[in-house]
Structure formats: C-alpha cells, structure tokens
Amino acid sequence: MSHQATLSRTDLKALDHWIDGASAKPAGGKYLETANPMTGQPHMRVAAGSAEDVESAVKAAVEARDGWRRYVAAERGRLMLRLAQAIRDNKDKLAEMERTDSGKPMAGALAEIEGSAHYFEFYGSLVYLPQGDVIDVAPDQHVFTKREPYGVIGVITPWNLPLNQAARAIAPALVAGNVVVAKPSEITSQTTIEMARLASEVGFPKGVINIVLGTGIDVGEAIVRHDEVRKVAFTGSVGVGRAIGKIAAERIIPLTLELGGKSANIVFEDADLDVAAAEAVKGFTLNAGQVCSAGTRILVQRSIYEEFTQKLAAETAKIKPGENLGPIITPAQFQRVQSYFKVAEEDGARVLAGGKVAKVKGQEEGFYVEPTVYADVDNAMRIAQEEVFGPVGVAIPFDTEEDAIRIANDSDYGLIGTLWSRDISRALRVADRIEAGQIFVNIWNTMSVQTPFGGHKNSGYGREKGIEAIHHYSHLKTVTVKI
C-alpha cells in the first residue's frame, strides 16, 4: 500500500489538520491513503499538507504566542492537568485509534495513552518550580537569571509511538510558554489530532497547539525552514536528522534530535539468567521492535553463551504475532525488516528463532514478522551495526569486562545500555564507561517521564523528559540591576 496523494477513495474516513483551534482541510485539497497494518487494507485518508498549510498554522501560532506567554504559569499548569485528565477520560477511544493506525495490541496502546497523559500531568505540575537563580556578583548589583520561551516550536514525530512522542515534546514546550506547530507521521496521525481537539475542548486558546498533516518533504521541511519557527524537536531517522540539522545550521536555530539506536544489552556470567533472558526478549520485541531504545545487541559472556542463547530461544517462542506482538507499522518498514533476514543469512548468523514473515489467522495480509533472534553474530556484521527497527535481536559473545565495553561502544549509536550482573562494583564500572545517554542495571528500560532521555553519537542530542527538557524549550536570560 503506497502513501501517495489520492482523491480516488472518498469512501475512506478523512482526517484533516487542526489549525487555530479548529479542523482545517488541506489547502491543496489532496489526501494520502494509508493502510491498516493488521490487514494490509486501505484504512483512511490523511490530509496531504503543504507549505501553505504550514503558513496558516504558523500564523495562528504567532497570533497566540504573546497571549500564551503572558498566561499566569499556574493557569498554564491547570490547563495541562485538564488535558491530562481528558486524555485519560478518552483512553479507550484514543487506544483504538492507535491500534487501527499502528496495529499494536490494545494493552500496549492503552499503556501509551496513559504515558501521554502523564507527560501533561508532570509538566503541568512543574510550573510551580523556581525558574531562575540569584547570583551574588557585588553588593550594589542584583543579578538574576530567568527562563524565557523561544516562541513557535516545530515538533516532528515518527509513526511508532504517535501520541506518546507528540506529548513528550509538546508538553514541556507548552509549559515553558511556547506555542507549537506539530507534524505527526502521515501514517499514524489520528491520536495527535484528537489530542489537539481535546486541548481546545478543555480551554487551551486557539493557535497554541496546531497540527499539520502530511509528508516530511511537503510539511516537515516547511516547518523547519519557516522564519517564525525558533526551535525544532525531531524524532526519526539519522538521515532525516542530518537534513534537518543542515537547515537549522543555516538558520542558526536550536534542535532536539532523537535519532535511534542499536543498544547493547550485556549479560555477565553471574547474572540471573532467567530474568535476563526474559527481559532481553522484551527489549527487542516491545512494540514489535519499533522503538529507538530497543536492546537489539545482546552481549553474552562466553562461559554462559550456549545456555543463555537457549533461554533466549525459549523466551522468544512465547511471543506470538497477532497476540502479544503487533505488526510492522508501515509497508516500507515491513519490506526493510524482511531484507535483514536475508542479510543475516548471507553474513552467516545462526537462526535461534524466527527469521520469517508470520501469517496470522484472519489477518493473512497483515505486516507481521516472527520475533527473531540470531546467534554466532560478530559485532561487525550489518545485522549488529544497522538499526533494523523490527523484532530482531542478535546474540554476540564476549570474554572479559573490557571486551564487553569495547563491543558495546563499537557502534555509531549511543542511546541506551543495559547490563546484568550481581557484582554491583562491576555494574557501576561498566555503566560509567558505556557511551550512551541512559544505562540500566538489572532492569530493562524503565524510563519514566521524570528521567531525562537522549542520546550520544548518532543517536542525537538534547534531552526530552524530566525537568531537563524544559531547559531545552527555553532561553536563559541574565538580568543585572544596579542598586
């Protein structure tokens, strides 16, 4: 199923932009046809936005900018909390939208909706924290710092975690006093539009949240290039991140980039192997592996390698496509994951489990693949170096602590790292030396809204989540007063 602009399927539900507090049809009158990944069948028509639509959205944001900035911080916080509650009140509807757009199991969709509500709740509460410091320079000078909003923030989000990723950027941007023009993926747009509608319903002023639908080429680039957009937050591929970075460099505007990963999950011989195996499989199959923080490189100490890989195979067999494993979300990504099955075979990796397309009863045309894990993998193999973005893990043997650290850091990415050991001294030594933005010890990826999230190397820069995110959505100003 392509995602080309079409006017032929008027029988499909149409989804329009949300601009200046209301639904808005695309200026060019064109729509993109999307597919339901569970069935492969046409799903809906999504507005094919253009630079003209972006102009309308930015104009609305600029008109709302000064009024929103002048809101008493506590009132901004109350609106954020109302939106959090509205998302929870509509969780079943939103989860069904996520399910039909992305195919993920309902339990996962509901968890994502709850996480999205939590962002607005968390940042809505932070308005009560101090946002500056007093600096002791001299007795006759009063020097203080304060944080100020950029103005219009451009937010560009991917298709894998639609509402969650949108909330992750929009919530701190708003609480810092900014207004937003966002572009969700054209493939999974429903929940972001519904969130904006709910925001208007609970009292957000017109123009504070604007959503323009369409492709990255037609809409995303127009957002990044617009003179009134003063900062951009992007989550997606390294290639697109580089392209956005070039435009931002020309314009001299700041970015937050979260660009993916090939995270190492290190299992030492003294670990609880049963727990580590179960969590390792969760690490590369969660959301069908379509998460940037997936722990796809499983580094296993050689003394336990055979035993542990058998446990990996057994745990992987418990993951069932169509039950607790959703489909690959896009047709193009479905083909890409399949291409890596061939790459792994050509490189000589040994299949422990999976490695094929999966056929789900009643959904035979859906974009399903088997949960897959390979053994006898060398870290130089493509399957170990390139982000597959599917439920595919590789088991790589290592001998010593130094060996594990070297292999873990031998990657262009640096998003997260995980290690399993009962030796806390070793765990802390290794955690200190892994080149990644987040490290987990004896637990898999329990990132919360409160903890800063971001990467090293090609995984990007800047931080989302936590109090730290507000700093990335605001300027710091120093004021000096002679007294």
Image (cartoon, rainbow, N blue to C red):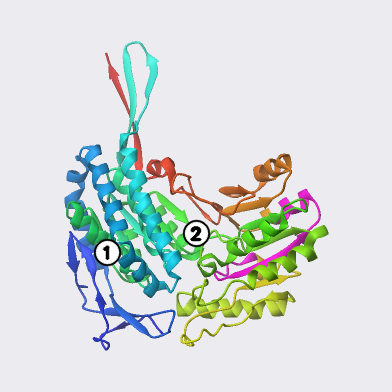
| Residue 448 higher or lower than 467, as above or below | below
Quick one: label 2 or label 1, which is nearer the N terminus? 1
The residue at which mark 1 appears reads as: 194
| Residue 66 higher or lower than 182, as above or below | above
| x and y, in percent, of residue 427 in the image | 69, 44
Residue at coordinates 67% horizontally, 51% vertically from top-left? 419
| Residue 117 higher or lower than 381, as above or below | above
Queried whether the magenta region covers residue 405, the answer comes back as: yes
Question: Could you say which disc has been placed on residue 142 in the image?
Answer: none
User: How many labels, in total?
Assistant: 2
How far is disc 2 from disc 1 in space, using C-alphas?
26 Å
Residue at coordinates 21% horizontally, 54% vertically from top-left? 61
Q: Quadrant of residue 138?
A: top left
Estimate how packed mark 2 is, as few (under 14), some (14 to 19) or many (20 or more) residues with alpha carbons within 10 Å.
Answer: many
The residue at which mark 2 appears reads as: 259
Estimate how packed mark 1 is, as few (under 14), some (14 to 19) or many (20 or more) residues with alpha carbons within 10 Å.
Answer: some
- Nearest to the eye among marks 2 and 1: give it: 1
Q: Quadrant of residue 356?
A: bottom right
Q: Quadrant of the N terminus?
A: bottom left
Tag 1, which secondary structure?
helix
| x and y, in percent, of residue 267 in the image | 71, 55
| Residue 289 higher or lower than 84, as above or below | below
Front in this rendered view, residue 201 or 33: 201
Residue at coordinates 22% horizontally, 64% vertically from top-left? 18
Inspect the image, locate mark 1, and give the three-letter code of the amino acid beneath it: Glu
Lateral position of residue 293 relative to residue 20, left or right: right
Lateral position of residue 159 relative to residue 62, left or right: right
Q: Quadrant of the C terminus?
A: top left
Residue at coordinates 21% horizontally, 78% vertically from top-left? 29
